Each structure stands twice: as structure tokens, then as C-alpha cells.
Image (tube, rainbow, N blue to C red):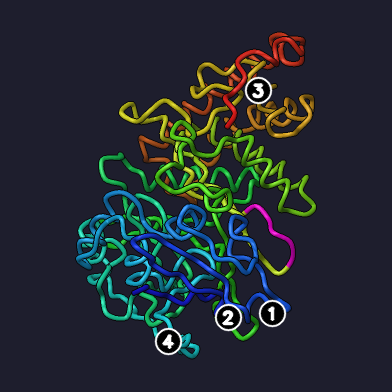
Amino acid sequence: MAHELSVWLFAHRVGTLRLLQGRLNFGYVPDWLLHPAAVPLSCSLPLQTAAFDDHVARPFFAGLLPEGHMRRLIARQFQVSGQNDFALLDHIGGECAGAVTFLPRGQPLPAASPPDDVQWLTDGELVAILQELPKRPMLAGTDGLRLSLAGAQDKLPVVFDGRRIGLPRHGVPSTHILKPPIHAVEDSVANEAFCMALANTMQLNPAQARIHTVGEHAFLLVRRYDRQLATDGSVQRLHQEDLCQALGVVPEMKYQNEGGPSLQQCFELVRQVTRPSAPQVLRLFDGVVFNALVGNHDAHGKNFSLLYGAKEPTLAPFYDLLSTAVYPALTPKMAMKIGGKYKFSELMARHWAQFAQDAGVSKAQAKKRVLTLARQLPAAAVQLQADPAQAFATSAVVGQIVKLIAQRCELTVKRLTADVGDALAPKEARDDKPQTR
């Protein structure tokens, strides 16, 4: 007998997710296919009458769930298999990334919950949650909470009204994501806050994030870009999906060396689905260069997203910006190749030229944008570090990031300006091409 969940997008039931012989199966319902406002859940799940099998459906649906150790702990909490995407969505798929909600078949979407259906937390309760999250991710099993976010790091959807932090109950949309320190990663909160603030200084349109403290505990509070305030003051969901979901890549293969998306595939997707595409392509280009210069080696396909607003899809604000290169124990390899190279130290002018070709950007324009970022970033980092309105001056990790940025930018400028012909020569540009899939 098939297990079934109704899949809702905003206030519309759009399809049915089934578990058939241990595998996912998804189909749109006829009413949604005939609806004048019908849109697909994902670029990888176009509107059609035929159902999608596990191979096609799983990348989107599994991509809504936590990963790794967090996923295993949640599965243990509910006494289900860690590989059972369906059971996990049944238990925690109430408040997900974007505007998707999962409910038992036949159960209607709850009437709009009162905006005050939030469990506001005292400082003591918040401290207790910060201590509990590593053992019980997403507070799985708490009555009235069905919360899910992708990724392998601890985080929690919350409501923040400018003063108080609360838990969204019974379908109330969250407004922010609470991110506690990453285990065994020194001062990760200051690291991510600094990189996010630096991206904002460079006008790269990241999600808005700030450090908050309760007692001796520091955490990052990130405003959700997939939530917006309606005219009546209520919080409304916006739909979104990450690039792995859009490209039909399962989360466990998100890194390029495991078969995940390449930068070329990401740029091709953005060019295909956004209109006008040129500004979005250049935003993605700048984001990739920024990640390379600040040492964010974990910028894989799930760390870039498409946001579906009232008009055409756009590249979502950047998020999960963390300088991993300052930690010697973490890999020196970037999640996606730039010009055929995984290591930043190996990037020469010809590799940047190849990256421009992969991105579909002219070599001259690409070189100008890389040089502009590399020349402006070090001073911006120093200024941000010293800003008395921020809390970065006392962070040793931030000091290391500032030095790393200066070194990487100096090296990039030197290699791009040493020989103009090297960057543009067709023969050189053909060397060290990235693998294609």
C-alpha cells in the first residue's frame, strides 16, 4: 500500500508525494495543472501529467532535508531509517526552504495561524535550545514544530521581531535562521558574520546577518530572504530552490568531485531561467570570485539558489559565506573548479580566462571584474574589521581572514597583470580545461 503526502505550494495543493516500494514518486494533481497560476515546484520537475520516478523526484525533495549527522539524529528521534526521505518529510516537512509544505493526504492546509502563535523564548530557554540543538537538530519531535532546513550544520528556523526570538508553531512562517557555532571550527560565528558583512560592503547582495549573544553564547541570526512582509503585516513565504535541486542533483553528490554541478552548469542554468539573465550571470560571477578571494572553499551547488518572486526568477541573495581556508584542518580544495583548478594557489591568468569562458562572460569583462574585486576587497576588509559598530576587531579568526584576503588579492592582481597576453591568448586559454559532465 502506498504512503502518500500532499504537497502544498503557498495555499495550493499542487501534487502528491508517494512512497512506492521504498522509492519516491511525485505527480502534480490535475487541478494544479489546469490552474492559471500554475508553476512547477522545480526546474527539474516541469509541469506535466505523468508522474516523476525516484531518480527525477528525489533531488528536489531530499534537497529540503538536513544532511549528514543531523539527518541521522532526526531519523533516530522518530525511529525511522536515515535514508527514508519520505518519513523525514512526513515528520519535519512543515516549514521548509521556499514555500513548500507537506501534509498527510486528505488533511487540508491549516487556516492561517494567528501571528502570535509563536513560543517566545526567555534567555534561559534560548540557552537551553542552543545546548540541545547538537543532540536534537531542528528540535525534532517537539509538539507543534515541523521544521526543516538543508545542510549539514546546526541551524534552526525562528521568528525574530527585533527584540524577541521565538519558535514558529503550527505552520507559522519563520523569519530568521539561527546558526550556533560550528563544532570544532574556531569562532565560526564571527567568521561567517564578517564574510556576510563584507559581501554586503561590496554590494554583492548577501542575506542580512548579525551576531547575537545570550549570556556567554554567541550565534548568528540570518534574515530569511524567502520570507517577506505582506501589506497587512503578516509574513509570507517566497518559493526558492538551490541549484542542485534545480539541476536534479541529489544532496549527497553536491560537490563537483563527487559528480555535482560545475560552475559551467550553474551559469548555464542561471542564463536559461532568469530574465533578463545578464545581471544575474554577472552577480553569480562576482559571487564566485568573492568566495575564492575570501577563501570560502565550501561554495557548492547547494550554496547558491534561485528565488521565485512575483516576476521572473532571480539569483537569490548569497548565504553560507564562511572563510574555510583559514582553518588548516579543512580542505584546500574548492567545491567547484575555477578554470579547471580546485586549488586557489594554482589559479593563473589562463585559468581565470577559462572561467570567463565557462561563465559565458567576455574575457576582457571578466578580467576587469576580477581585478576590481581584488583591488577593492583588502581595504574594505580592513575597514570593516576596524568598524566600532561591529564586533570583529577582537576576533583572531577575523584577523586571519583579513590577512588571507590581502594575500589572495595581491596574488590575483599580480598574476592577472603580469602578462596581458597570457590572460587572453587563445592557446593558453585552452590549457587545463575543466572536466565536463
Residue 390 position (above or below residue 381): below
Question: Circles 2 and 1: CB distance less than 8 Å?
Answer: yes
Label annotation for residue 115? none
Q: CA distance from mark 1 to mark 3?
A: 46 Å
Say if residue 296 shows up in the picture.
no
Work out how far the residue at label 3 is from the one at label 2, CA to CA, in angstroms: 45 Å
Q: CB atoms at circles 4 and 1 under 8 Å apart?
A: no
In this view, the residue in front, 183 or 63, is 63
Q: Earlier in the sequence, mark 4 or mark 2?
A: 2
Count every numbered label the image shows and give the total.
Answer: 4
Q: Residues within 10 Å of mark 3 (few under 14, many from 20)?
A: many
In this rendering, the label closer to the viewer, 1 or 3: 1
State the extent of the magenta-drawn residues as a range.
Answer: 311-315
Residue occupied by mark 4: 107
Q: Circle 2 — which element?
A: strand
The three-letter code of the residue at mark 3 reads Trp
Q: Which residue is mark 1?
A: 35
Q: Which mark is residue 12?
A: 2
Q: Is residue 419 highlighted in magenta?
A: no
Residue 75 sits in which quadrant?
bottom left
Which structural element holds mark 1? loop
Q: Position of residue 207 (x, y in %)?
A: 55, 55
Q: Are marks 3 and 2 in contact (CB under 8 Å)?
A: no
Q: Nearer the viewer, mark 2 or mark 1?
A: 1
Q: Amino acid at mark 2?
A: His
Residue 38, image x and y in percent? 68, 73
Q: Which residue is mark 3?
A: 352
The quadrant of the picture occupied by the N terminus is: bottom left
The answer to which of 43 and 26 lies nearer the viewer is: 26
